[in-house]
Amino acid sequence: MRLLALVLSTALILPATALARSGAIAGGPTADRAAHARLAMVPPVPQEDETLRAVIADPSRPAADTARDAARHPFETLTFWGLTPGLTVVEIEPGSAGWWRGILEPYARNSGGTYVAVNRPADGMGVADGSADMVVVARAFHNWARDGRTAPYMAAFFQALKPGGVLAVEQHRSPGDLDVSVTAPTGYVSEAYVIAAAEQAGFVLDGRSELNANPRDDHDHPFGVWTLPPVRRSSGQGQTLTPDERARYDAVGESDRMTLRFRKPG
């Protein structure tokens, strides 16, 4: 299957050598990039999940959601994260659009699992401590980095997950180790920042994938990541994009995004 081939060719799994712990995130990303670079290309076990395929292909999904599938690779991404029937999945801040929720919630309902949406992790994770199989965080770290929520939220995720549970991350990615205080207001953070935050909370980086990478995204847009689809912001702060500029940013497509899988030891 072409989709499974894409998963197999883009999944990056940790070798036996443990990752070195990174330093504090407050002063900027200090993750051990040499250790992370040793992630090897090892194919995961293929999981052909017909229930998941059916949910994604459901004609009742909003047209605006299905239009995003080509850029967001829902089947491949969820397979990489390890979604299987019967899991308890907590999604953090699904938002009003609820793109991931529109897949995760019916999948849980149809596969004997449980879906929980949590908007304020500091007030509770909606599940008993140590009971969640997976916590999903999509495109939120740039908000948390701006007001100090990253560390307490990561601690809450760690507490909610059972040993061996997965923290699944998709996030707009800035290049290199740029200072998060500079990049977060534009919607981007570095992989090093996210990895360092997760490791400080006790997680182990279990896999990286380029499924949602976009080399056309140069990360430099007049209205940050929101210049790009699907938001397509075209004016503000005294500036308005010309039709040609709008077309050029539309041609970029959605943002360059990291796709990470962390695991709670045990």
Image (cartoon, grey):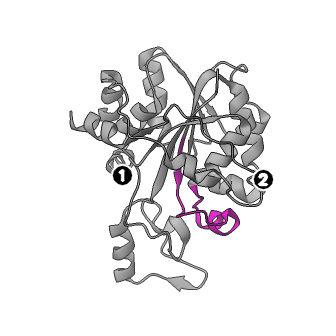
Give SS at disc 1: helix
The stretch drawn in magenta includes residue 177:
yes
Farthest residue, direction front:
17
| Label 2: how many Cα within 10 Å (few below 14, some 14–19, many 20+) | few
Closest to the observer: 51 or 257?
Answer: 257
The type of residue carrying mark 1 is Ala
Is residue 143 visible to us here? Answer: yes
Location of mark 1 (residue): 71
Query: Residue at 67% across / 62% down in the picture?
Result: 180
Is residue 126 visible to us here? Answer: no
User: Magenta segment, which residues?
Assistant: 169-190
Residue 236, quarter of the rendered image = bottom right
Query: Measured from the top left, where is residue 120 in percent x and y?
Result: 72, 40
Query: Measured from the top left, where is residue 172 in percent x and y?
Result: 52, 56
| Label 1: how many Cα within 10 Å (few below 14, some 14–19, many 20+) | some
The type of residue carrying mark 2 is Gly
Location of mark 2 (residue): 148
Going by the image, does 222 lie left or right of 243? Answer: right
The quadrant of the rendering that contains the N terminus is top left
